[in-house]
Amino acid sequence: MKIEVLRNVLQKNEWAAEENRACFDERGVTCVNLLGGAGCGKTSLLEATLPTLKENLRVAVLEGDLATTRDAERIAALDVPVVQLLTDGGCHLNATLVQQALKQIPLDELDLLVIENVGNPICPANFDLGEHRRVVVLSVAEGDDKPAKYPLLFKDADLIVLTKCDLLPYVKFDVERARADLARVNPRAEIVRTDTNTATGIDRLAAWLSATARPQASA
Ligand code: MG
Ligand code: ZN
């Protein structure tokens, strides 16, 4: 009996990821993989930024979840094309699942595709989906020890978004300590502080996402 080891799974994933990336490149679509633990505020960030992104970019969202279409409904309410990818309990997206979902997405009509990964700070980070950029979300409610405890999540991030910063007076989260740990794990990622209640940092996030999409779209 053949036992498939994780190495093979990741190798297969890498092939599918390269195919996805080639597919995005051919069509001039920039793909962003949005990762973070459950409840860190990924969907809320999308809700806050999509109205601005929509003004200048053709954007769609691929929602990864274990169950329910709740997040997809929130995106659809903004009149943004969305496909819900249910993993039926699977704790991460992989490039093959994304490849299947891409059949439902009119890539020729897009500049930017955001993939909201399954809420999980661990294994989604191991699976390249074929994205061009990785955005990692950390809410201050999760605690400032998370960058040190989950370094793999942050290691390959191009942008790190601190969310729920309006809770800073109420939670144990030392921003400077988190910054120092993040700098050790990933010295190159920019860090943006946000809070969706007062829209703090949302303009900056929208500008970052727009800038990342434009060069591809005009290529
Ligand atoms: Mg969500
Ligand atoms: Zn997993």
Image (tube, grey):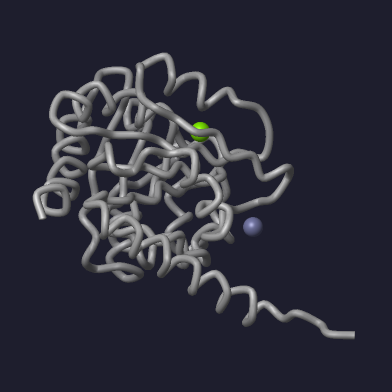
Among the 4 quarters of the image, the one containing residue 157: bottom left
In this rendering, would 111 be left or right of 170?
A: left
Horizontal and vertical percent position of residue 50: 28, 27
Q: Nearer the viewer, residue 46 or 23?
A: 23
Q: Which residue lies most toward the top here?
A: 77
Name the foreground residue: 122 vs 90: 90
43 or 215, which is in the foreground?
A: 215
Name the spot of residue 28 as percent of width and height, x first: 22, 52
Residue name at image x 64 percent, y 80 percent: 8
The structure residue drawn at horizontal position 62% and vertical position 82%, both measured from the top left corner, is 7
Residue furthest to the right in view is 1
Q: Quadrant of the N terminus?
A: bottom right
Residue 88 percent coordinates (x, y): 73, 42
Give the image location of residue 36, x and y in percent.
Answer: 47, 47
Q: Quadrant of the C terminus?
A: bottom left
Q: Residue at x 40, y 47 (%)?
A: 34
User: In which quarter of the view is residue 13 placed?
Assistant: bottom right
Q: Classify residue 203 as left or right of residue 23.
A: left
Could you tell me how many numbered marks the image carries? 0
**Left of 92 or right of it: where is 35?**
left
Task: Check the image and report above or below for 3 versus 122.
Answer: below
Report the residue at 58% width, 53% height from top: 97
Residue sitting farthest toward the bottom: 1
